[in-house]
Image (cartoon, coloured by chain):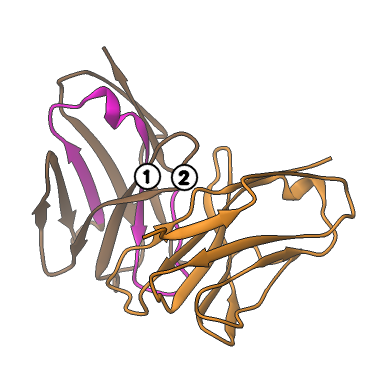
Amino acid sequence: GESVGLHLPTLSVQEGDNSIINCAYSNSASDYFIWYKQESGKGPQFIIDIRSNMDKRQGQRVTVLLNKTVKHLSLQIAATQPGDSAVYFCADNGSNDMRFGAGTRLTVKP
Amino acid sequence: NAGVTQTPKFQVLKTGQSMTLQCAQDMNHEYMSWYRQDPGMGLRLIHYSVGAGITDQGEVPNGYNVSRSTTEDFPLRLLSAAPSQTSVYFCASRAYDYNSPLHFGNGTRLTVT
């Protein structure tokens, strides 16, 4: 079936550096993508979304880039802070049978 | 707003016991779903519902039953618990429109011995 998946299971960055988390998807008909953040002991929380008619969307310190040609999206976090330490998931929201990848665990070093 | 509320937070069962994981949302969302999360496996969809009276299977439905008698509630039943069902379970909801994000509860950690 169709799936989404992240490229790296773990990512470690220095506090203050920028972080980039990458994700690939397989359904070329997908038109809506979401990034979620999951802190320890909590459920995933919505960070930012992007529709297929856009290449880039910015939020507060976060940017999502979508490359439909290679079916790839990325989450960029500017000036990474200790509070950004979490597991990040991308999801293809285009159906009721919504699948997630395994997530990337981001660790921020002081 | 409470959002998505799951109870209990923790549960220990013996093999063969049954139980119901409760999920309630107060956002009037039509769509609700259950996921399980195991180490290294990410979130796997168990069952979902697009409205009261309608349920459907996800990726890993075996061993679980659901029903949706009201818009607010979507309980997950384990009829005969097995150690393989040890996991963290998350309930989520969203509006019917695909173009809206899921809202997750904070999970139920289930251990089956």
| Chain letter, colour orange | B
Q: Amino acid at mark 2?
A: Ala
What residue is rendered at 55% in x and 49% in y? Answer: B107
User: Which image quarter: residue A66?
Assistant: bottom left
Q: Which residue is mark 1?
A: A6
Q: Chain of mark 2?
A: A
Percent position (x, y) of residue A90?
Answer: 34, 51
Rendered-image quadrant of the N terminus of chain B? bottom left
What residue is rendered at 33% in x and 75% in y? Answer: B98
Magenta-colored span: A72-101
User: Which image quarter: residue A9?
Assistant: top left
Q: Are marks 2 and 1 in contact (CB under 8 Å)?
A: yes
Relative to B97, does residue A1 appear above or below in the rendering?
Answer: above
Q: Residue furthest right?
A: B16
Q: Residue furthest front?
A: B1
Percent position (x, y) of residue A97?
Answer: 48, 71
Q: Which residue is mark 2?
A: A102
